Amino acid sequence: MANVLTRLARTIESRQGADEKKSYAAKLFARGPEKCAEKFGEEAVEAIIAAAKGDKKNLTEEAADVIFHLFVMLASRDVKFEDVLAELERREGTSGIVEKENRNK
């Protein structure tokens, strides 16, 4: 499963500077990192609404949109998906409560 996410991240990263008429991601990149972040937020809200309504099919679709737009937002700020994975691995096996407390030290 992680392979599809890694492929998606690489594909999105490769769209920076590409033809906006041929790539939706390229169109978002051209609008700037702030727009990429805004679009991620919009998609997250749509996922929240689908979850609140209990619409499993729509939530599945919106969750895919959230992941796509998260990757666009990360790439727009030159954050690599591999770095996010490394951070998740660093946190693996640690209670969320403990991890959050350690971040504030």
Image: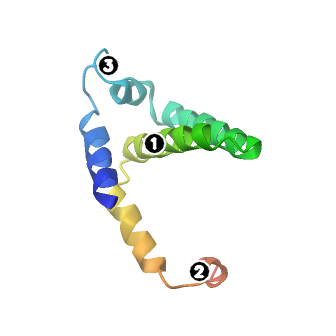
Q: Residue 38 in the image: x percent, y percent?
A: 58, 34
Residue denoted by label 1: 73
Q: Earlier in the sequence, mark 1 or mark 2?
A: 1
Q: Give SS at disc 3.
A: loop
Q: Residue 39 in the image: x percent, y percent?
A: 55, 33
Residue drawn at point x = 31 percent, y = 45 percent: 8
Distance in Å between CA atoms under marks 2 and 3: 40 Å
Question: Which quadrant of the view contains residue 27?
Answer: top left
Question: Which quadrant of the view contains residue 29?
Answer: top left
Distance in Å between CA atoms under marks 3 and 1: 16 Å
Q: Amino acid at mark 1?
A: Met
Q: Residue 102 in the image: x percent, y percent?
A: 60, 83
**Relative vertical location of residue 48 with respect to residue 79 in this rendering, above or below:** above
Q: Give SS at disc 1.
A: helix
User: Could you tell me if the residues under marks 3 and 1 are in contact, i.e. CB atoms within 8 Å?
Assistant: no
**Relative vertical location of residue 53 with respect to residue 105 in this rendering, above or below:** above
User: Could you tell me if the residues under marks 1 and 2 are in contact, i.e. CB atoms within 8 Å?
Assistant: no
Residue denoted by label 2: 99
Q: Residues within 10 Å of mark 2 (few under 14, many from 20)?
A: some
For residue 15, side relative to residue 29 (left or right): left
Residue denoted by label 3: 20
Q: Amino acid at mark 3?
A: Glu
Q: Say which of 51 and 91 sits in front.
A: 51
For residue 77, side relative to residue 105 (left or right): left
Q: Earlier in the sequence, mark 3 or mark 1?
A: 3
Q: Residue 21 in the image: x percent, y percent?
A: 31, 14
